[in-house]
Amino acid sequence: MIQLHNVSLAYQQDASALNNINLRIGKGEFVFLTGPSGAGKTSLLRLLYGALTPSRGQVLIDGQNITRLSPSQIPLLRRSIGVVFQDFKLLQNRTVFENVAITLEVLGWGRADIGKKTMHILKQMGIESKYNLVTQRLSGGEQQRVALARALVNDPKILLADEPTGNLDDANKNQILSIFKEANIRGTTVIVATHDRRLIEQSHKRLVTLHKGEIVEQMEKEAASDEQTL
Amino acid sequence: MNKWKKKQPATSKPFKRPTLAGDGYGGRAGFFLHRAVTNIRQNVFVNVVTIGTITLALLIVSLFLLVFVNLESAAENWSERVQVTVYFDKDLTTQDQAAFREKISALNGVSRVSYVTRDEAFKRFKSRLRGQATLLEGVRPEVLPTSFEIALKRSHRDTASVENFVSALKRIPGITEVQYGEEWVRRFNSFLNFMRLLGGLLGGFLVIAVIFIVSNTIKLTIYSRRDELEVMALVGATRFFIKAPFLLEGLMQGMAGSIISVILLFGLYEGFLHNAGSFLTFNPATSGLSFLPPEYIAGLLLAGALLGFIGSLTSLKRFINV
């Protein structure tokens, strides 16, 4: 699903954010990216959704080399990738419904279908009763679930999350984690960048550790069954 | 494009493949329009500020235009006084009159030639000295000269053209005495040039200031919504899709601003300015200032719409880079 070959990224000529990264992530995998701040987690995710282009190396997503995409093809790539952030990036003056529906509007769906599908995903996230509230009136956990709904509403092939639980308490972290797992079970490849050790230890998933722009450690999935932890 | 996989849990009803709102740019026009109107409704304050700025900016420009257009038309009227007179000592026979008239009319820039007989000249002299009839005692029409009065076309009323015309006129055999108030023509023309220069400069600065202010206001309003641009880009919206509602919004703001400014201008004109001309004895030909001609109004409306549209277009360029 995702392949990185000798990928390097330099913001300026001296400081390199990523250095010779080689990584393969299979279809339907669940991967944690971890490492200290500034290790390159966010940069790696940004490469995957086409917000950055590597200075060297190739990034393949679903067999397509995205380093060769023209600017007009980037939006098409992003339609199969859902992204969530630590700061949610919701539109504060819009309702929950509008925030989620935007993904489907971009795809050109008709109104009736947008309504049905949006309410369906909100129900999955357990926030359907709040559909008509503006997002700034929601709690942090609820806001992150709206962001997840927006990312997942069109059933993306890949879900990228950058410190998704950074602003949340433990109860909310667990809820968010189980949403990731559900999405993963339904076939979405999930990549979560976090330095929250507890989150990683709890979920027994493949772990990729970055340090100073290089992969320093890779741990394969532990034997424990995922379904039990749900 | 829309890969709709049935991946819902078994408890939920599977959806059918979604219907699309419409293919291509045309099919989305309704969506964009709806989006733009919703944006305006959701950001009332920002829109009021933008429309207000455009309104005031265009009002200033249109007030300036109103004054300038009236000055120009006043100048046109004054320039009617640029007139060349050819004097003759003797009465001309009808043949001579016709011959001279023909030769004069053949010259470049002549708009009207009229012959003034001694009797006509005497009548004018008398009317000019009305109330002082004693001065006219013993004066008879025979002492006055006959003359041709020549009016010039608009394009030939500047100093150089008038002088060229006079020298050409003097080359016609039989014409010796020509008068044209050269000092007045010179002063009038230098005043006119000065006024146009000043108007051009002022107008130019005004337009630059207006473009600057409006484009910065629009830039700020778009800056305040940059997170929206970011989110749209994140969920895979094309540049066109992100821009279109903003451009429509800018267009609507521009049109609203220009319509309000024209209404305000008309209100100001009706309330204060339409009789200001007689107060200032500004324009001798008409009783007061005239309102802007329709093509100027159309120009203002168009300028407003363009201002909004292009202002949005250039501002969006800076913020869509995700």
Image (tube, rainbow, N blue to C red):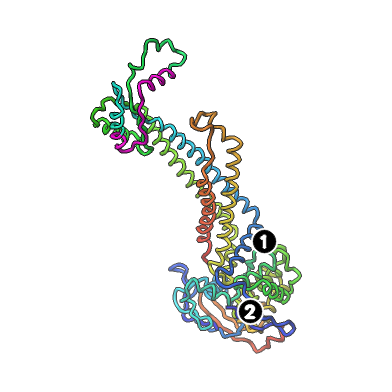
Is B284 rendered above or below residue A133?
above
Q: Is residue B176 left or right of residue A181?
A: left
In the rendered image, the quadrant that contains the N terminus of chain B is bottom right
Q: Residue B75: horizontal and vertical position, in percent?
A: 44, 34
Q: Residue B94: horizontal and vertical position, in percent?
A: 31, 28
Per the image, the residue denoted by label 1 is: A93
Whether residue A162 appears in this view of the structure is no
**Which residue is at the front of the view, A101 or A61?**
A101
> In the current view of this chain or complex, which residue is farthest to the right?
A129
Whether residue A154 appears in this view of the structure is yes
Per the image, the residue denoted by label 2 is: A155
How many numbered markers are drawn?
A: 2
Q: Secondary structure at mark 2?
A: loop
Badge 2: how crowded within 10 Å, few (<14), some, or many (20+)? many
**What span is in magenta?**
B102-127
**Precedes in sequence: disc 2 or disc 1:** 1
Residue type beneath disc 1 = Asn
Q: Is residue A179 left or right of residue A72?
A: right
Is B175 rendered above or below residue B24?
above
In space, the residues marked 2 and 1 are separated at their CA atoms by: 25 Å
Give the label on residue B167, or none. Answer: none
Q: Quadrant of residue A14?
A: bottom left
Q: Quadrant of residue B92?
A: top left
Residue type beneath disc 2 = Asp
Q: Residue B279: horizontal and vertical position, in percent?
A: 55, 28
Please give the chain letter of the residue carrying mark 1. Answer: A
Q: Secondary structure at mark 1?
A: loop
Q: Residue A141: horizontal and vertical position, in percent?
A: 70, 70
Is B301 rendered above or below residue B287?
below
Which residue occupies 30% across, 35% down? Answer: B102
